[in-house]
Image (cartoon, rainbow, N blue to C red):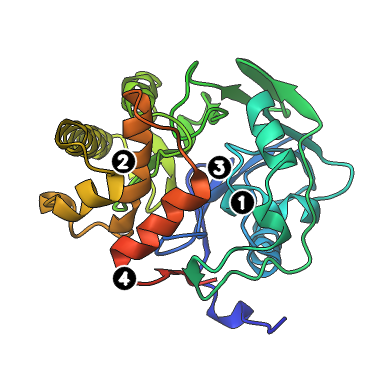
């Protein structure tokens, strides 16, 4: 594949003496955040990236800034932008994930070839499917020497069914995965609109000094209430559009076309309204979510393939 590493804009942002965030602007489709926690016994990585070049850029930045080798890693959920690069981690690193996340990655067909729903179509490069070998159902604690990483599941479907946050209490840093987006449209079609909304109070309850969302800039404690309020307003908007569509007897795409995005129109990836409505309909007992169909209708709503920078 063509070497596009010169245009990669990922940045390793130091948050504390032990914690770094890997932030990939502008956080749109397939451009995730990841993280690093430095322990006396080695390095703990939170998520990888979607493609070989982007994961390599992340791991090279870690090697250049943090002493030690990668000994542990966790995937916050099974979407490929957070886990397709797993195979580029050291072979002897212990990889952890929620049991539902593990099953979803094990059966994920998109790693074998991305459908032409995005433009340009992502090229994953030389990555192979690597599923975590250590799974958990509720929480898992990893001691890395000088710091503790607490991995927790919200207890219900939210962004997906197998979400995990990574909390480093001694550093006051919380990695939320895609339970939070910052400045972008949230995506919940493989989880639950109500569950994603319920997870917001749970995230706030950690009392983190800094929060690393799955996509978008790092969030300070002072910024977090507004970010949470924006998410809550968006989920209420999605539920309202769904309720109106169900009342009128129209499908999610038709409901989305009639909706006024209002304050959310400026958020990147507005087309996510369509798959989110598919989930809201299913949450209300109307139909089931077909992932490919929901994303295909997002393309129809947008008037063309969804944009990527991979």
Q: Which residue is labeled 4 in the image?
A: 303
Q: Position of residue 168 (x, y in %)?
A: 54, 28
Q: Residue at x 71, y 65 (%)?
A: 52
Mark whose residue sits in front, 1 or 2: 2
Q: Are marks 2 and 3 in contact (CB under 8 Å)?
A: no
Number of the label disc, if any, that sits on residue 277: 2
Q: Determine the CA span between mark 2 and mark 3.
A: 42 Å
Could you say where residue 264 lies in the image, as x and y percent from the top left?
A: 18, 51
Which quadrant would residue 306 be assigned to in this image?
A: bottom left
Q: Decide which of 281, 79 is in the foreground and name it.
A: 281
| Residue sitting at the far bottom | 2
- Numbered tag placed on residue 17 in the rendering: 3
Task: Please tell me which of labels 1 and 4 falls first in the chain.
Answer: 1
Which class describes the residues within 10 Å of circle 3: few (<14), some (14-19), or many (20+)? few
Front position among marks 3 and 4:
4
Marked residue nearer the N-terminal end (3 or 4): 3
Using a 10 Å C-alpha cutoff, classify the residue at mark 2 as few (fewer than 14 neighbours), some (14 to 19) or many (20 or more): many
Q: Answer few, some or many: residues within 10 Å of disc 1's Cα (few below 14, many 20 plus, some between 14 and 19).
A: many
Mark 3 to mark 4 CA distance (whole Å) = 46 Å
Crowd tier of the residue under label 4, counting other residues whose Cα lies within 10 Å: few below 14, some 14–19, many 20 or above: few
Q: Which residue appears at 31% of the width and 70% of the height?
A: 303
Q: Where does the image place residue 42, in percent across and percent down from the top left?
A: 77, 39
Residue for badge 1: 80
Q: Which mark is residue 52?
A: none
Give the residue at the far right of this rendering. 92
Q: 285 or 62: nearer the eye? A: 285
Q: Nearer the viewer, residue 38 or 205?
A: 205
């Amino acid at each position: 594949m063509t070497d596009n590493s010169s245009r990669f804009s990922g940045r390793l942002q130091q948050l504390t003496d032990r914690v770094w965030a890997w932030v990939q602007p502008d956080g749109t489709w397939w451009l995730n955040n990841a993280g690093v926690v430095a322990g006396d016994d080695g390095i703990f990585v939170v998520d990888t990236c979607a493609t070989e070049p982007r994961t390599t850029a992340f791991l090279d930045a870690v090697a250049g800034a943090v002493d030690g080798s990668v000994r542990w890693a966790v995937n916050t959920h099974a979407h490929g932008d957070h886990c397709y690069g797993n195979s580029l981690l050291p072979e002897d690193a212990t990889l952890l994930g929620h049991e539902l996340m593990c099953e979803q990655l094990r059966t994920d067909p998109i790693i074998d070839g991305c459908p032409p729903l995005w433009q340009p179509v992502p090229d994953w490069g030389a990555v192979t499917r690597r599923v975590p070998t250590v799974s958990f159902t509720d929480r898992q604690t990893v001691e890395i020497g000088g710091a503790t990483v607490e991995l927790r599941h919200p207890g219900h479907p939210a962004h997906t069914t197998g979400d995990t946050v990574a909390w480093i209490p001694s550093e006051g840093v919380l990695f939320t995965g895609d339970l939070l987006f910052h400045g972008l449209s949230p995506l919940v079609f493989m989880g639950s609109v109500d569950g994603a909304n319920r997870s917001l109070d749970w995230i706030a309850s950690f009392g983190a000094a800094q929060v690393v969302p799955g996509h978008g800039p790092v969030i300070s404690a002072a910024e977090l209430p507004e970010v949470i309020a924006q998410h809550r307003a968006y989920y209420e908007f999605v539920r309202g559009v769904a309720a109106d569509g169900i009342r009128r007897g129209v499908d999610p795409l038709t409901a989305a076309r009639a909706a006024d995005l209002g304050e959310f129109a400026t958020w990147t990836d507005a087309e996510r309204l369509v798959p989110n409505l598919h989930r809201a309909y299913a949450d209300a007992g109307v139909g089931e979510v077909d992932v490919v169909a929901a994303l295909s209708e997002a393309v129809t709503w947008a008037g063309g393939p969804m944009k990527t920078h991979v």
